Amino acid sequence: MNLRVMRKYSVGIDLGTTNCVVALADLEAEQPSIALLPIEQLTAPNQIEALSSLASFLYLQTDQEQQSGALAVPGRDSAGPVVGEYARRISAEQPERSIAAAKSWLCHSKVDRHAPLLPWGAPDELPKISPVAATQLILQQLVASWQKSYPDHPLSDQLVTLTVPASFDMAARELTREAALQAGLPDDFILLEEPQAAVYHWLEKTGDRWRRAMQEGDTLLVCDVGGGTTDLTLLRAEQEAGELILRRLAVGDHLLVGGDNMDLALAHFAAGKFRDKGLKLNAWQSVSLWHACRKAKESLLAPSGKDRESISVLGRGSKLIAGAVSIEVDREVVQQLLVDGFFPECTSDAEPQRDRSSGFQEIGLPFESDTAITRHIAHFVTSNAEESTTAAETRLHLLLNGGVFKAPALRERLQTVLGQWSSSGRVPDSLGGPEDLDHAVARGAAYYGWTKQYGGMRIRGGTARSYYVGIESAGLAIPGMTRPLQAVCVVPFGMEEGSEADVPGREVGLVVGREVQFRFFASAIRKEDRVGNVLRDWDEEELVETAPMHLTLPADDAPADNAPDEGFVPVRFHSKINELGVFELWCNSVSNDQSWKLEFNVREDALSEDSGAAQA
């Protein structure tokens, strides 16, 4: 039976750093009609609600809570971690049992993302889970909610598009894919970059009118500032076969700065006011204050918000009410604090401040030391100036995404700064509106899936980075030194899904019979490199090493004249980006039809043998 024929829905999943959203479009309808999935979750002990989003928080229950069953959700492991709104709320009281920003850990290559290390910094005696497992649990909650709402249409039978940050490298994408498959998503689900999904939402809303909003040569800056991250993408309108299309030009780094930083900034400001009242906050109260400031920030930045908000923390006494201490903060003061702190005015050649004051740093998520998002945008736009400009200055358009931009003050400041960078002083057009910032990515992903069946404008662009494989140079060994490493380009920038290429150049020895390390590199800067280009020297900023693979290739099937004595098989490379956007590197023997496939991932079974030719 062909499951593809049975697909009824295109499902878009926004796996957000702080919130997840699921949208769907009926594939039997010739016009897209997109709806949101109600997501069932625990909001208080013994209280379950269906909300439009799922908070990306997990809470690890105590033994007493597991025995009571008060935090159980029907149909799920009653002793397992709690996912969703209650986990977000309890994080203020139980930070050592709470997990946030699991998605950001997936792209942190300095740690083992399969190891039980979350909650980060929790005492050793408390239970922990891995970033991959945490992501899987969040996705399982979404899958369970789908199954309850659509029991006759399993999610595994639908056309599913899961979004990831544009800044995710191949390793982080593969970890996301691994968690998603374990959670119950179909084997052929699609990974789509979040900024592109936001653009697809805008295209769905505007239809063919988008071609009147943009002209050939215009550039579009997508600025997505969510709770935990900032994601930047640059696109350009081009002519192709007499038709205007959008082509992605560049993506930014994975910037860990967003709404959570704003909450913390407000908490720091509020802590000073508490000190003025004679209350010095302890660690527990500081975490509680951080979460209290989130609600105050949302109210004070909202167009219809209050002029003043009260922020309270519990005192150190035993009485709950009597021990509460409160302060009031003004709307105008908070707006000034956050607008100037995160979107300060700066020149177009400004650079983020990356100085470290200490030679020792705590290991953890690599949060940005400079919270000025406008300086990060300036660096991104300047670094890609040749891509985004022509002989005459082009028009710049702006598409905003993320809950941070619900605040008019932040939207207006960013537009003003971008206008100051233009020689004409023209403030860029803002495409789309602020009314759907929370749901645009999921809705755009659902629309993207619908267009695969019915057709529609597709963003061109391919891979967001060039990829390289590290090859050890031949030569005399020197005591205490490793042989120099060459980097061979196997995937050029912009290689499209569904395309493949032979890698030209000389034969390479593929080591067999013992565990070795396969090293891969990526670059968002070197956009001119072609397949087969060899780099013998490079800067660390040019090429960034991704997670290596430690694998053993069995020597049993290797050619007898190579494997036992020399320990390697002469091969040639063949690269492929499959339809799901996964990078496959095929190693084809030059002496027979044997081939091995290296999928760019970090799983133990990353290497597989194929007895035939290296074909998709």
Image: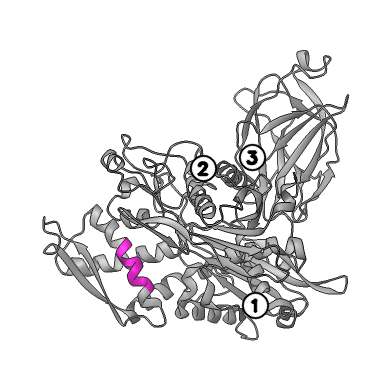
Q: Which of the 4 quarters of the picture holds residue 591?
A: top right
Position of 167 with respect to 555 (left or right) is left
Q: Which residue is mark 2?
A: 132
Amino acid bearing label 3: Asn
- How would you rate the neighbour count of disc 2 (Cα within 10 Å): few for under 14, some for 14-19, many for 20 or more? many
Q: Is residue 515 above or below residue 211?
A: above
Q: Where's residue 329, x and y in %?
A: 27, 76
Position of 566 with respect to 355 (left or right) is right
| Labels 3, 2: front one | 2
**Image coloring type:** one colour
Amino acid bearing label 1: His
- How would you rate the neighbour count of disc 3 (Cα within 10 Å): few for under 14, some for 14-19, many for 20 or more? many
Q: Is residue 456 above or below residue 90?
A: below
Q: Which of the 4 quarters of the picture holds residue 430?
A: bottom right
Where does the C terminus fall, quadrant-wise?
top right
User: Is residue 220 at least partly visible in the picture?
Assistant: yes
Q: Earlier in the sequence, mark 2 or mark 1?
A: 2
| Labels 1, 3: front one | 3
Q: Where's residue 348, x and y in %?
A: 59, 73
Query: Could you say which is closer to the camera, residue 567 or residue 580?
Result: 580
Distance Cα–Cα, label 2 vs label 1:
36 Å
Count of number-bearing discs = 3
Q: Which of the 4 quarters of the picture holds residue 335?
A: bottom left
Find residue 601 and name its label: 3
Query: Could you say which is closer to the camera, residue 413 or residue 434?
Result: 434
Q: Where's residue 1, x and y in %?
A: 74, 44
Check residue 531 for magenta coloring.
no
User: Is residue 379 at least partly visible in the picture?
Assistant: no
Residue range in magenta is 291-298
